[in-house]
Image: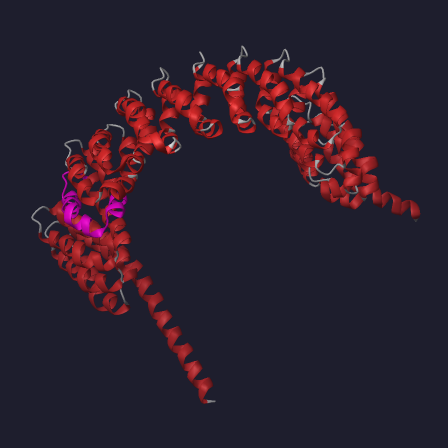
């Protein structure tokens, strides 16, 4: 019997071994995902002595299986007996940190970093730090790249002798023959610098930073730029000029556009790290050069930082620096040949108005906004319209309407229908920015004019636009402002415009609610059932079907049903078809309403009966 019990207790590991050796990848993957369950079944002792050695010996599998294993092991501390035994997880994770597939190595390093926190300082020196050394001096570049991510997690908690060894290993990896290793070291340089003592930042990290920033591979140099932000925040102000700035100036003028792009992308962070004085003397000229760069990607990255850079300039001479140095570059970018550059600028340029104030905005920025508002690229126009509220706060709605609104109206009446369509799509956004009173005064007429445009796509978009406006301004506004004008089109001599009335009613009925639909819209739809054009009549049937769920049962029964029955015997086949379909749908709606009413009555009587008893 004891032997049988022993066999039973071995069963989970036997299942795992069978599934891990199965040819089906999915089965192997599923068994790895159940590791925690199997470890619980085995208990901590057997997990350490049987399961982990088995996993360490069998790390030759599909990448997705290894990825799942690397993730699982990071959460295994309690399953091996807690922090005291956490070092047992190191052998399988060490093997995983050396595999060829990058995502598996990264996940193994992530799990190693996680369990390093569970090690006591003694265990860290006895078990974890030797693992880091083995990886750092491995024959294959894969293990050496993994080692780069582990130095910073063990450095703060080891003795000074071991710290010196770790610094030496990191220095060696920064000058490794393989670019991938130098790249990994450069990506962790800033993180490692943060855990070092200041004296070693100066003596060890700065020379490494300078060397990596001058590396022959641009992929290494651009990562050194990223590290520059962290290093600059650690050094006292007086050391920045001599230790960091020469390298940063060199990076801003690097022959590779990717390095210059990284400088542009990190510019605001660099600006905060180096402080106002260096910003004024060094970063302003560098930023000007990046805004004028020959590569569009660099100009776009720099353009994206214009507002942030200007906000972070020292207040005492911010306006003077912007007007003299930044604005001339911005004016050139407004008419850049690349649409991504113009779009990046358009997303932030409106923010300059709050920095420069009313007079400068009116004189210098408004002409630029106008140019961008008329840009052929839709994204540029959208970015300007989306940020109008920034300018509105500074110069006021009247000034805004005098300067920018004529440009919007001009675009709304453009000969090219696609330009008109683009402006319609921005109208709800614009309405929200400008408010209901201003909208009624300046833009309402424009929105109604689109409903009778000769291009169907414009009429369709204008209908959708009205719905969004009603959702924004409310049903009462629609009843007073929109609905009367829409219903007035029902008598238009052009049948296309009469049909637009029906399309608008379809779209607005739900937003306006039952009362407005029943009292104002329904009579017009019913009257149009006598229209001479068959297309209008069958659209009446479709409209009655569409607005049916909004109407009450009385209107459906006494007003809608007779009209649909009349249309069902129309001479036109299409009118007949759509009328019959509407009768069927509205019949179902009516049944639902009646059953709901009956249930309500029944519920009421039950309550009355209970009360009487």
Q: Position of residue 233 (x, y in %)?
A: 53, 29
Q: Is residue 281 above or below residue 416?
A: above
Q: Is residue 193 above or below residue 564?
A: above
Q: Position of residue 129 (x, y in %)?
A: 75, 27
User: At 30% from the left edge and 59% from the top edge, which residue is drawn?
Assistant: 584
Horizontal side, residue 319 vs residue 100: left or right = left
- Quarter-of-image position of residue 334: top left
What is the tally of numbered marks visible in this picture? Answer: 0
Is residue 437 on the magenta stretch? yes
- Quarter-of-image position of residue 281: top left
SS majority, magenta: helix
Q: Position of residue 29 (x, y in %)?
A: 66, 35
Q: Which residues are magenta?
A: 428-456
Q: Give the camera-side residue of 601 and 466.
A: 466
Horizontal side, residue 607 vs residue 585: left or right = right
Horizontal side, residue 484 vs residue 75: left or right = left
User: At 33% from the left edge and 33% from the top edge, which residue is drawn?
Assistant: 347
Q: Is residue 533 above or below residue 176?
A: below
The residue at the far left in this view is 493
Q: Position of residue 312 (x, y in %)?
A: 40, 32
- Quarter-of-image position of residue 348: top left
Q: How does the figure colour the protein chain or chains?
A: secondary structure
Is residue 449 on the magenta stretch? yes
Q: Is residue 320 visible?
A: yes
The residue at the far bottom in this view is 613
Q: Is residue 101 visible?
A: no
Q: Give the camera-side residue of 120 and 10.
A: 120
User: At 79% from the left edge and 42% from the top edge, which residue is drawn?
Assistant: 81
User: At 54% from the left edge and 17% from the top edge, which residue is drawn?
Assistant: 220
């Amino acid at each position: 019997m004891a032997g049988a019990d022993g066999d039973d207790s071995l069963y989970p590991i036997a299942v795992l071994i069978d599934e891990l050796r199965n040819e089906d990848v999915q089965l192997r993957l599923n068994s790895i995902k159940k590791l925690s369950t199997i470890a619980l079944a085995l208990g901590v002792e057997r997990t350490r002595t049987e399961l982990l050695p088995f996993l360490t010996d069998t790390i030759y599998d599909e990448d997705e299986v290894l990825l799942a294993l690397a993730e699982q092991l990071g959460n295994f501390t309690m399953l091996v007996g807690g922090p005291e035994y956490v070092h047992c997880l190191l052998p399988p994770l060490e093997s995983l940190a050396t595999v060829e597939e990058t995502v598996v190595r990264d996940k193994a390093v992530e799990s190693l970093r996680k369990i390093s926190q569970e090690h006591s300082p003694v265990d860290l020196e006895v078990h974890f730090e030797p693992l880091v050394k083995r990886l750092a001096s491995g024959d294959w570049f894969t293990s050496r790249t993994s080692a780069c991510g582990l130095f910073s997690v063990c450095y703060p908690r080891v003795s000074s002798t071991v710290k010196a060894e770790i610094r030496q290993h990191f220095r060696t990896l920064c000058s490794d023959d393989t670019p991938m290793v130098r790249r990994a070291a450069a990506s962790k340089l800033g993180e490692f610098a943060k855990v070092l003592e200041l004296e070693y930042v100066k003596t060890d990290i700065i020379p490494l930073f300078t060397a990596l920033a001058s590396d022959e591979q641009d992929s290494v140099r651009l990562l050194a730029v990223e590290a520059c932000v962290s290093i600059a925040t650690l050094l006292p102000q007086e050391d920045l000029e001599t230790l960091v700035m020469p390298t940063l100036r060199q990076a801003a003028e690097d022959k590779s556009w990717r390095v210059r792009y990284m400088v542009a992308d990190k510019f605001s962070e660099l600006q905060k790290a180096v402080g106002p004085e260096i910003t004024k003397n060094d970063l302003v000229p560098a930023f000007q050069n990046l805004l004028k760069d020959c590569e569009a990607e660099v100009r776009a990255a720099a353009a994206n930082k214009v507002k942030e850079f200007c906000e972070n300039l020292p207040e005492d001479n911010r306006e003077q620096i912007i007007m003299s140095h930044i604005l001339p570059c911005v004016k050139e970018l407004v008419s850049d040949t690349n649409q991504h550059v113009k779009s990046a600028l358009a997303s932030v340029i409106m923010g300059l108005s709050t920095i420069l104030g009313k007079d400068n905005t009116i004189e210098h920025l408004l002409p630029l906004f106008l140019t961008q508002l008329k840009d052929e690229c839709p994204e540029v126009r959208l970015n300007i319209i989306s940020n109008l509220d920034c300018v509105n706060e500074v110069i006021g709605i009247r000034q805004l309407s005098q300067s920018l609104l004529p440009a919007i109206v001009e675009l709304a009446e453009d000969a090219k229908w696609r330009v008109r369509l683009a402006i319609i799509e921005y109208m709800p956004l614009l309405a929200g920015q400008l408010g209901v009173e201003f909208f009624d005064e300046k833009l309402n007429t424009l929105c109604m004019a689109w409903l009778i445009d000769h291009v169907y796509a414009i009429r369709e978009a204008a209908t959708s636009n009205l719905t969004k406006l009603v959702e924004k301004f409310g049903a009462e506004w629609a009843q007073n402002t929109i609905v009367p004008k829409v219903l007035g089109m029902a008598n238009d001599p052009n049948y296309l415009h009469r049909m637009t009335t029906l399309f608008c009613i379809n779209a607005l009925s739900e937003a306006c609610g039952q009362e407005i639909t029943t009292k104002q819209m329904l009579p017009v739809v019913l009257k149009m059932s006598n229209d001479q054009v068959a297309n209008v009549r069958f659209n009446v049937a479709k409209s009655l079907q569409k607005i049916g769920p909004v109407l009450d049962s009385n209107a459906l029964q006494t007003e809608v049903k007779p009209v649909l029955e009349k249309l069902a015997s129309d001479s036109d086949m299409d009118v007949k078809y759509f009328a019959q379909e509407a009768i069927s749908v509205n019949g179902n709606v009516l049944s639902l309403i009646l059953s709901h009413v009956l249930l309500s009555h029944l519920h009421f009587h039950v309550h009355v009966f209970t009360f009487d008893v």
